[in-house]
Amino acid sequence: MELEIIKFFLNLKDSCIFNIFAVITGKTYIFITVLMFAAYAVYRLKKQAIIFILVLIISVSASDVICYRILKPAIGRLRPSVELRLLKQENLNNFSREFSKKDFSMPSNHASNVFAFFIVYFIYVRRYWIPVLINSLLIAVSRVVVGKHYPTDILAGMITGIIIGLFFICLFCLLQSLVRRKKTEPV
């Protein structure tokens, strides 16, 4: 079923929709939109901006490392493009090769990273969270449209990013409360 979804989108390769999603999935688009939302957050949060930036950088970095270095190799699901190539070549002969981490698709790093960003933004800023959510969804869905991931890879990435983001938000809240308690304790 999921491979059929990928084939459907790959048949749209020369369409306007495919080209739009190819731009959305690119590093430039992601960098500009995330930077724009982060800049607004810093402006809005003022004194809390440093905590926001710290939690954001740690959450997105952890999300990226955990997905790429731990989850992808552990799960070992091949990207749709690799599977389609293997299916074509299997008809010709038995094809075997060693796969690298870049050939694995579950979970999607893009989805995990943008949803770690989204949850941190949502918890700290709250204002204008709907455009951030829509942007995160567009980036995540773009990975399916361009044939890099299956829909379940995206879902797993979204869940992973949210969990990692929430973990670091809770950790920083706990650290902040410990620091406040330490300051108010009599000497």
Image: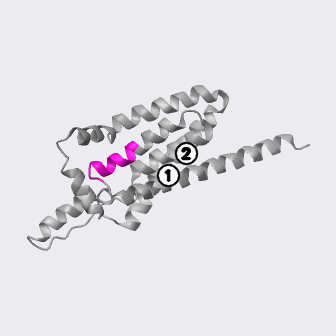
Q: Where are the magenta residues, as a range?
A: 138-148
Quadrant location of residue 54? top right
Q: In this view, does 89 lie to the left or right of 128?
A: left
Q: In which quarter of the image is the C terminus?
A: top right
> Is disc 1 in contact with disc 2, using a CB cutoff of under 8 Å?
yes
Q: Which residue is drawn at 31% across and 56% down?
A: 102
The residue closer to the viewer here, 7 or 43, is 7
Amino acid tagged 2: Ile
How busy is the neighbourhood of tag 2: few (under 14 within 10 Å), some, or many (20 plus)?
many
Q: Where residue 29 appears, x then y in whole percent?
A: 36, 35
Report which residue position mark 2 lands on. Answer: 119
Q: In this view, does 121 lie to the left or right of 7?
A: right
Number of dots carrying numbers: 2
Report which residue position mark 1 lands on. Answer: 161
Q: Where residue 125 appears, x then y in whole percent?
A: 60, 35
Q: Residue at x 22, y 54 (%)?
A: 8
Q: Residue at x 29, y 53 (%)?
A: 148
Q: Is residue 49 above or below residue 176?
A: above
